[in-house]
Image (cartoon, rainbow, N blue to C red):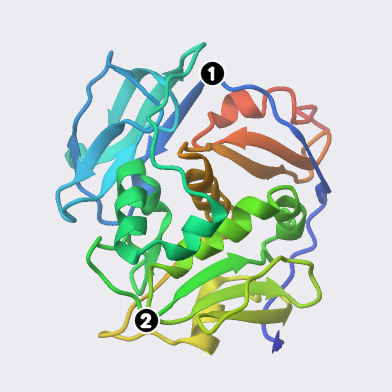
Amino acid sequence: MIKIKRGLDLPIAGVPKQSITDGKKVRSVAVLGPDYVGMKPTMLVQEGDKVKLGQILFTDKKIAGVNYTAPAAGTVIAINRGQRRVLQSVVIEIAAQEEAEEFTAYSEDQLAKLTGEQVRQQLIASGLWTALRTRPFSRVPAPEAKPSSVFVTAIDTHPLAADPAVIIADQKAAFLAGLKVVSKLTEGKTFICKEAGKDIPTLTGNNFEVAEFTGIHPAGLVGTHIHYLDPVGASKQVWHLNYQEVIAYGQLFLTGKINTQRVVAIAGPQVNEPRLVRTRVGANLEELLAGELNTATT
């Protein structure tokens, strides 16, 4: 166990109740360009096009083979660009009946026999490859790159954060399947980083290592974990991803379908009912938060 003594926990009002309810249904979703450092898109759709969930919206000119796919089925209603035509967002109005691309489904026994190449191909085809980030530089990795290790972040010490244990408990089978998938991406360790004492399901084996952290923020930051467990350098790269993305990986490989559900915390001093809600990737925040905020002035 690693204890973090230097840092700060901010005492902000409006701590969310750690139970999950359904959030408001949103009418639109978006893929945000600033989420992907250094990405330069080659657009494959234009405004007005109908798209399926999982259909390729654009690829990256700088990293061959990386696909960015639609988080919903519907109509592309806006492609927003900023200065020098830098992509800001691709907005999709969600269809009443969503059509989706389908991928290969595997049994739990088959997951253990998958090769790293099979995993990479399915993640790239589905667009879920873009959930991975490199350290250093925090970029989507190149498909042919090989990390020293992969970090799964199953701890969150940000103020007002959702408890990963609550969310993972609701999707245990998918999380464990996702861990098997993630472990195929490296010949090194897959680190499962969790809060000491928290009930997070894990896997055993030579390529898995459970690392427990305790203490104040930044005990939950991946940079902290990497510093202690597998420091990077100019010639050494590790990858990391969030526990909810691991769940999404597991669902993709078990069902052959992209599951866009995510759980977020609606919290803070201006929130009427701080809690955890189910929503979807890229949800329109204005629609999700309608009626949730106390707008009265004092």
Vertical position of residue 239 compared to residue 34: above or below? below
The quadrant in which the N terminus is found is bottom right
**How busy is the neighbourhood of tag 1: few (under 14 within 10 Å), some, or many (20 plus)?**
some
Instruction: Please indicate, yes or no, whether residue 217 appears anywhere in the rendered image.
Output: no
**How busy is the neighbourhood of tag 2: few (under 14 within 10 Å), some, or many (20 plus)?**
some
Residue 45 left/right relative to 181: left
Q: Position of residue 54 (x, y in %)?
A: 38, 33
Mark nearest the camera among 1 and 2 is 2
Q: Which residue lies at the image location 50% right of the left edge and 72% below the top edge? A: 151
Q: Can you tell which mark lies on residue 27?
A: 1
Vertical position of residue 37 compared to residue 153: above or below? above
Q: Which residue lies at the image location 27% right of the left edge and 38% below the top edge? A: 87
Residue 194 left/right relative to 199: left
Q: Nearer the viewer, residue 66 or 114?
A: 114
Image-quadrant location for residue 57: top left
Instruction: Please indicate, yes or no, whether residue 22 appears anywhere in the rendered image.
Output: yes
Q: Nearer the viewer, residue 297 or 270?
A: 270
How far apart marks 1 and 2 lie (CA) works out to: 41 Å
Query: Of helix, strand and loop, which one carries label 1?
Result: loop
Q: Are marks 1 and 2 in contact (CB under 8 Å)?
A: no
Vertical position of residue 8 compared to residue 267: above or below? below
**Amino acid at dot 1:** Arg
Q: Position of residue 215 (x, y in %)?
A: 75, 80
Residue at which label 2 appears: 148
Q: Position of residue 235 (x, y in %)?
A: 25, 85
**Amino acid at dot 2:** Ser
Residue 65 left/right relative to 128: left
